[in-house]
Image (cartoon, rainbow, N blue to C red):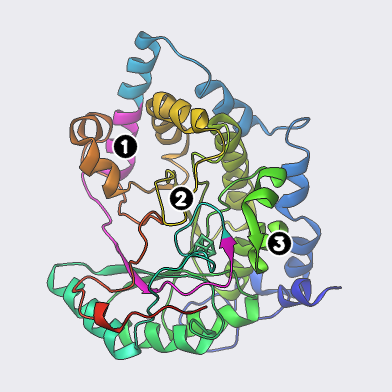
Amino acid sequence: MTERSASLLALPPPGCRKNFVETPVAKPALGREIIEMSFAQTLDNLPLQKSTLVRGFEELIAPKSDAELESMARTSRALTLQNFGRTMRLFAPLYLSNECINNCRYCGFSRDNPILRVTLSVEEVAAEAHYLQQAGFRQVLLVAGEHPKFVSGDYLVECVRALASDFPSIAIEVGPMASSDYVPIVRAGAEGLVVYQETYQRAVYAELHTAGPKRDFDYRLDCPERAYAAGFRRLGVGALFGLWRWQDEAIALAAHVDYLLRRCWQAQITISLPRLRPAAGGFRPLGLRFAHQFSSGRDCLEHARTAFFARRAGIVRRNDDERREPHRARRLHPPGHGTSASDRGRSNHSAGFSGRRRQASHRSI
Ligand code: SF4
């Protein structure tokens, strides 16, 4: 058994904020089951074997006439209202650090990009969070690049602990960690974890992730299950659209959600469809035509996602979509379901909302 797979068996300690000790997932037997049944096998067999749910989703994203698309839009709207009402779970991303040891060709935070780097101190994180709280936010997503020196597990624990009393919902989006490393973060008060696979195509993934631990495709793919085993009860997944043919990514993402719904059944699974945007480093998407095709097929995918997963999973809307296409966004989605923005297109998010840390930026690896 590898060190990583062994970490899946780590049991959450007693007294953890979430009462997962009594749940089946905390039992070693299920831990072993998770290791043996990694989604990697399902993904690799996907061209030959699709579940009923995934086949249904595939039909929904097949080319549609305008009339069919309009019908899907009506269904999508009705399901949105039926499942979410007119409520919205609004969260804000808080960028802790843009230090990173990985090279991802599409990301401005890549270690070889000569951008200004900054990591907020815990006090600064608390100050930024206070700024968000004053603006009415009660849910926050802590985002950081992957750098064990600047963004350690202890640092994340301290950040979460500093915010736990003011924010009933705290999620993290950081480099994948071992299950045992997640446990203290859950104990400190985090309940959600977001990890996008970026692309579900192994060859494309290998080409785009040129250096750093992120090159390990399977380790990232199994991250939601490790987080679940540690006690996270909200798991966000997604693909970065614009890296490859959007239909292939959407089907693989649907299969991943299908798998997680069964495997991590006590967690809420949320689905995001982030789009690639220009970033420091000058990366041109692998075949710009794929990004363009995604734009033209996006209505279909949005409707399909809602029509198919509204009863099963959370739908994450990004406010950069709303800003750029407000009329389209309103038409597609009445006020009703979860939202916010997080993107990797800009070169330095980590100055925070108030921008007060900007003068302390530096260039480093
Ligand atoms: S995508 Fe994430 S891991 Fe890759 S360079 Fe950007 S911050 Fe680092």
User: Which labelled disc corresponds to residue 80?
Assistant: 1
Q: Nearer the viewer, residue 208 or 77?
A: 208
Q: Nearer the viewer, residue 326 or 303?
A: 326
Whichever of labels 1 and 3 marks the residue nearer the N terminus, that label is: 1
- Would you say residue 132 sits in the magenta stretch? no
Q: Decide: is 322 above or below 157.
A: above
Q: Amino acid at mark 2?
A: Gly
* Residue at far right of view: 1
Q: Decide: is 67 above or below 294.
A: above
Task: Classify the position of the N terminus by image quarter.
Answer: bottom right
* Residue that numbered label 2 is attached to: 282
* Residue that numbered label 3 is attached to: 216
Ligand 1 neighbours mark 1 (CB distance < 8 Å): no
What is the x, y in percent for residue 316?
37, 49
Q: Amino acid at mark 3?
A: Asp
- Highlighted magenta segment, given as a residue range: 76-103
Q: Amino acid at mark 1?
A: Thr
Q: Decide: is 281 above or below 56.
A: below
What is the x, y in percent for residue 324?
23, 39
Residue 189 quadrant: bottom left
Is residue 165 among what the camera can see?
A: no
Cα separation, mark 1 vs mark 2, equals 38 Å
Q: Secondary structure at mark 3?
A: loop
User: Disc 1 vs disc 2: which is toward the camera?
Assistant: 2
User: Which labelled disc corresponds to residue 154?
Assistant: none
Looking at the image, residue 178 sits to the left or right of residue 302; the answer is right
Q: Secondary structure at mark 1?
A: helix
For the point 78% across and 30% down, the residue is: 48
